[in-house]
Amino acid sequence: MTGRIRVDMTSASDGYVAGPDDGPDAPLGTGGFRLVNWLDKRADPGPSGEV
Amino acid sequence: MTETAGKVRLYMSISVDGFITGPDDGPGQGLGVDGERLHAWLRDGGVDPASYRPAADVDAEVFDELMATGAVVTGRRTFEHAGGWAGDHHDGVPVFVLTRSVPDGPAPGHARYVTDVRSGVAQARAAAGDRDVMMHGASAAQACLAAGQLDEIELHVVPVLLGGGRRLFDGLPPGRVELELVRSLEGAGVLHLRYRVVGSDR
């Protein structure tokens, strides 16, 4: 059994992976850091930590 | 709104890349090219929405919930693509059709045209009483969201990438609308995610 190549991507309910106007100075765009808030729970027990 | 009042809830099948139709949707092809894939969790049906009731338990439960709503609010585009549901979406509940200009002649059956979002939703809430109100259509949902009148969004997430088509929330001005996941059900080849609209920073 070989490993798989899997895309891991945080996405908004409307399908965006960044806010508007993303660029070198704002890699997730305006308000886009909301998308990675779930990572604050990465050390907690439960599904977020598991992923 | 009192605690027992019903919720205004959008029900929408959506692809993982955020499309609610395939490309080139229009009259005679309401869901666009390959867009029927989004309704594969439903049974093949006709003009009568009840004919779409799915077989799988969880999916049938979700379907029964939307068919138990006490009023329907829809955009005119969705209404016309669906043949106006022959004037009766289900059980003769009133259908409020949001439109910019009221066409000549009366709306069919239990439908009526409304030009003001707030007034239309208020009439639907009043008609539904303690039952929920079913919202239909992307532009109607956006208008209600912008007016602060959309309580919940139920997405039926279908495991497919369509690559093009109509997006559910295209045209929303930039700004954040915070949602809270209140229910998650796994159906047969579809995930039913219910979100509460918590608030908007715009």
Image (cartoon, rainbow, N blue to C red):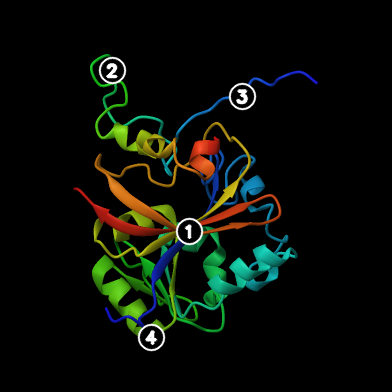
Q: Secondary structure at mark 3?
A: loop
**Which amino acid, mark 4?**
Gly
Tag 3 residue: A6
Tag 2 residue: A23
Hey, which residue is sitting farthest right in the picture? A1
Q: Disc 1 to disc 4, how far (Cα)?
A: 24 Å
Tell me which numbered mark, 2 or 3, is placed earlier along the sequence.
3
Discs 4 and 3 share one subunit:
no
Q: Chain of mark 4?
A: B
Q: Nearer the viewer, residue B46 or B151?
A: B151
Tag 1 residue: B78
Camera-nearest label, 1 or 4? 4
Q: Disc 2 to disc 3, how far (Cα)?
A: 25 Å
Q: Disc 4 to disc 3, how far (Cα)?
A: 47 Å
Q: Chain of mark 2?
A: A
Q: Secondary structure at mark 4?
A: loop
Residue B9: tell me if it is visible.
Answer: yes
**Which amino acid, mark 1?**
Thr
Q: Nearer the viewer, residue B49 or A28?
A: A28
Against B141, residue B32 (above or below) is above
Q: Please give the label number shown on residue B129.
A: 4
Q: Which quarter of the figure has residue B62?
A: bottom right
Against B52, residue B187 (above or below) is above
Q: Is residue A11 left or right of residue B197?
A: right
Labels 1 and 4 touching (C-beta < 8 A): no
Against B95, residue B182 (above or below) is above
